[in-house]
Image (spheres, rainbow, N blue to C red):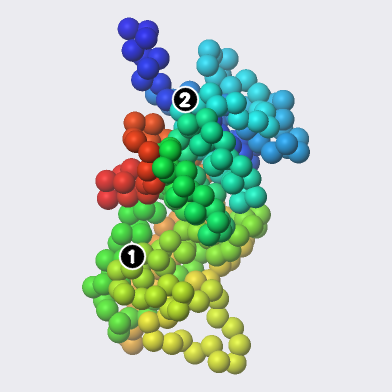
């Protein structure tokens, strides 16, 4: 019975363990009956190196301290770091045959090509947002745009805490892409980031994405649909990082049982 229970446990490595998301991931991983925190990793210059991983319980198989190197002792790595750390994490996962759940945003085309190559060897789930509600919002936003048609202007705005580095958020861009895909818009032509200047009048089928950075806002995303005389809004408000962390841990548990390939949260959630 012990061997069967051990087999059912998914070993998780958290990259960016000292960050805001990393801390919640470490803590919630310890509380999950089917997961164990195998490794906690942060940048070589991190002041957290050598410190106990957040939430770590003194149990066999649990990571005791945060290190700067992934040894390969996990089934799945969850990466919420920075773009400059992601390339090395992808390469290390391929080298150690560790599946990867990637939530880092602001990635380049080079990162995406690297992920395509990695998915030949390992399973990869990439998402800009792991919240169940946000992923449902992506689907609803696309469906609403289809149903309402071109008579309705569509705009997206997002708000996050003052420390977020990239703007607009990956979630806002994913919403815009979902709407473009559903309505035949061209993302590169029809999506604009902000609106300013003397010639800022809204163009037909244009979608503007606006970003706010405010205090300790966890994350808010609103899609506006408006025509003459009426307006509709679809909105998600994150009040805790736990919804994102829980979704990422769920994705990791799901991915551990999948073959190599690239997956999205729609695959994980069956949407």
Q: Is residue 141 visible?
A: yes
Please, what secondary structure does the residue beneath circle 1 have? helix
What residue sits right under mark 2 in the picture? 11
Q: Looking at the rendering, which quadrant does residue 39 occupy?
A: top right
Q: Tag 2 or tag 1, which sits nearer the N-term?
A: 2
Q: Nearer the viewer, residue 84 or 97?
A: 97
Q: Establish if 122 lies above or below 183.
A: above
Q: Residue at x 54, y 33 (%)?
A: 95
Q: Residue at x 47, y 39 (%)?
A: 100
Q: Establish if 60 lies above or below 150.
A: above
Q: Quadrant of the N terminus?
A: top left
Q: Residue at x 66, y 36 (%)?
A: 42
Q: Residue at x 61, y 42 (%)?
A: 88
Mark nearest the camera among 1 and 2 is 2
Q: Looking at the rendering, which quadrant does residue 185 occupy?
A: bottom left
Q: Nearer the viewer, residue 233 or 100?
A: 100
What residue sits right under mark 1 in the picture? 141
Residue 111 locus on image (x, y percent): 54, 53
Crowd band around label 1 with a 10 angstrom C-alpha radius: few (<14), some (14–19), many (20+): many
Residue 138 locus on image (x, y percent): 35, 59
Please, what secondary structure does the residue beneath circle 2 have? strand
Q: Establish if 30 lies above or below 191.
A: above
Q: CA distance from mark 1 to mark 2?
A: 35 Å
On screen, residue 237 versus residue 18, left or right, reads left
């Amino acid at each position: 019975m012990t061997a069967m229970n051990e087999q059912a446990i998914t070993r998780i490595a958290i990259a960016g363990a000292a960050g805001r998301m990393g801390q919640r991931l470490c803590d919630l991983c310890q509380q999950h009956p089917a997961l164990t925190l195998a490794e906690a990793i942060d940048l070589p210059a991190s002041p957290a190196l050598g410190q106990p991983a957040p939430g770590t319980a003194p149990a066999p198989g649990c990571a005791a301290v945060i290190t700067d190197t992934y040894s390969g002792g996990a089934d799945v790595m969850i990466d919420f770091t920075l773009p400059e750390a992601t390339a090395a994490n992808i390469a290390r996962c391929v080298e150690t045959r560790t599946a990867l759940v990637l939530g880092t945003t602001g990635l380049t085309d080079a990162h995406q090509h690297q992920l395509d190559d990695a998915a030949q060897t390992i399973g990869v789930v990439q998402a800009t947002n792991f919240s169940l509600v946000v992923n449902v919002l992506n689907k609803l936003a696309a469906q609403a745009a289809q149903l309402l048609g071109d008579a309705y202007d569509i705009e997206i705005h997002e708000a996050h805490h003052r420390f977020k580095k990239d703007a607009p958020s990956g979630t806002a861009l994913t919403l815009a892409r979902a709407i473009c895909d559903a309505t035949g818009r061209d993302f590169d032509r029809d999506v604009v980031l902000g609106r300013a200047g003397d010639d800022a009048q809204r163009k037909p089928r244009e979608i503007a994405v606006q970003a706010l950075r405010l205090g300790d806002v966890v994350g808010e995303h609103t899609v506006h649909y408006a025509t003459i005389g009426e307006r509709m809004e679809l909105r998600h408000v994150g009040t805790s990082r736990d919804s994102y962390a829980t979704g990422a841990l769920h994705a990791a548990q799901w991915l551990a049982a999948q073959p190599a390939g690239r997956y999205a949260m729609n695959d994980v959630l069956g949407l």
